[in-house]
Image (cartoon, grey):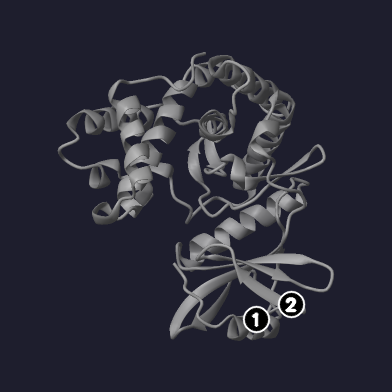
């Protein structure tokens, strides 16, 4: 996390570092800042969340995707021609990357329908096709396999007394780790394609925030937006089970237009949605202050506990 105490100092440093004339800088999160220029909007990421080598490999990957024609945010090189720069803020060295803002908006929840999600499936298919091409040219050295990331260390964060959930979490992890990894089903992907990381401009979709990109089974990049849509974007007016089926079909149909999708991986989609569900529950324990939980946080945690302990399937295929 990067706390910026003096936005004026940060603005001056960025203008000295990059070939742009930024007028304002405003915090969006602790790590992402929105910057405006006379005509364009930029976002600067300032974080040590991952090492210099990992961030450089990530940005090399996203710039490759951009050159291939995928709608992702392009980076702006510094005056030193670096895409990842080191700066000192509050006496601490941090890494910074400047992005030109992608076009589009966060789509209102009720507009995440089958047509939009089919287009998302197409974009994910293209992403994975370009990812395979990238890995042929640039073998990945620093971006982790999914299970080596701290966020997947479920048993470290889920309390010992929650024996049922720990058993389910361990079973999900061991089952997925035991799946055969081959070029057609496993590789570099976004890793966090929940709907807030997708911008919509008319019918065009852009993917943003590749900070959590990882090596994983490609089906996971399909499981995350399906999970996200069912969990956050269904606003009533119908049957949520049918909504889940319709958007799943739409995403899979779109994906198949751009990339192969082995039938055996489709059958594993509920397993990867369960992985995402346990992942989210573990993050609550990882980041929330257990001594100061709000009523809403307690309600959410209990909601997850009941679903996971009862082995409830979020997606009925």
Q: Is residue 180 left or right of residue 292?
A: right
The residue shown at (47%, 56%) is: 142
The image quadrant of residue 13 is bottom right
Q: Which mark is residue 304?
A: none
Please tell me in which quadrant of the rendered image residue 188 appears: top right
Which residue matches tag 1?
Answer: 11
Look at mark 2 in the image and give the residue it sits on.
Answer: 22
Q: Earlier in the sequence, mark 1 or mark 2?
A: 1
Q: Nearer the viewer, residue 178 or 221?
A: 221
Say what secondary structure mark 1 lies in. Answer: helix
Picture coordinates of residue 301, whole percent (x, y):
33, 38
Tell me if residue 208 can be seen. yes
Dot 2 surroundings within 10 Å: few (below 14), some, or many (20 or more)?
Answer: some
- Up the image or down, 289 lies above or below 199; here it is below
Can the viewer see residue 173?
A: no
Depth order, front residue of 65/100: 100
Position in image of residue 308 (x %, y %): 32, 27
């Amino acid at each position: 996390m990067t706390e910026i105490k003096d936005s004026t100092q940060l603005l001056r440093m960025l203008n000295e570092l990059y070939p742009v004339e930024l007028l304002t800088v405003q915090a969006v999160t602790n790590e992402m800042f929105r910057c405006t220029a006379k005509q364009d909007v930029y976002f600067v990421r300032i974080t040590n969340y991952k090492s210099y080598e990992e961030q450089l490999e990530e940005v090399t990957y996203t710039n490759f995707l951009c050159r291939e024609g995928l709608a992702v945010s392009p980076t702006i090189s510094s005056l030193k021609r670096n895409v990842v720069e080191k700066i000192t803020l509050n006496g601490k060295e941090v890494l910074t990357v400047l992005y030109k803002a992608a076009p589009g908006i966060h789509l209102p929840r009720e507009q995440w329908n089958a047509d939009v999600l089919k287009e998302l499936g197409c974009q994910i298919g293209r992403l994975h096709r370009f990812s395979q091409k990238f890995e042929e040219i640039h073998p990945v050295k620093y971006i982790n396999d999914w299970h080596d990331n701290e966020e997947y260390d479920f048993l470290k964060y889920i309390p010992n007394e929650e024996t049922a959930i720990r058993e389910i979490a361990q079973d999900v992890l061991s089952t997925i780790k035991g799946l055969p990894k081959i070029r057609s089903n496993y590789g570099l992907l976004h890793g966090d394609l929940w709907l807030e990381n997708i911008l919509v401009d008319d019918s065009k979709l852009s993917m943003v925030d590749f900070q959590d990109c990882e090596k994983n089974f490609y089906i996971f990049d399909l499981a995350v937006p399906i999970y996200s849509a069912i969990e956050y974007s269904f606003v009533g007016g119908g049957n949520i089970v049918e909504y889940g089926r319709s958007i799943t079909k739409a995403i899979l149909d779109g994906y198949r237009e751009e990339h192969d999708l082995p039938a055996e991986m489709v059958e594993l989609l509920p397993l990867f949605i369960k992985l995402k569900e346990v992942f989210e529950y573990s993050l609550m324990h990882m980041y929330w202050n257990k001594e100061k939980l709000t009523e809403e946080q307690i309600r959410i945690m209990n909601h997850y506990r009941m679903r996971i302990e009862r082995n409830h399937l979020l997606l009925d295929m």
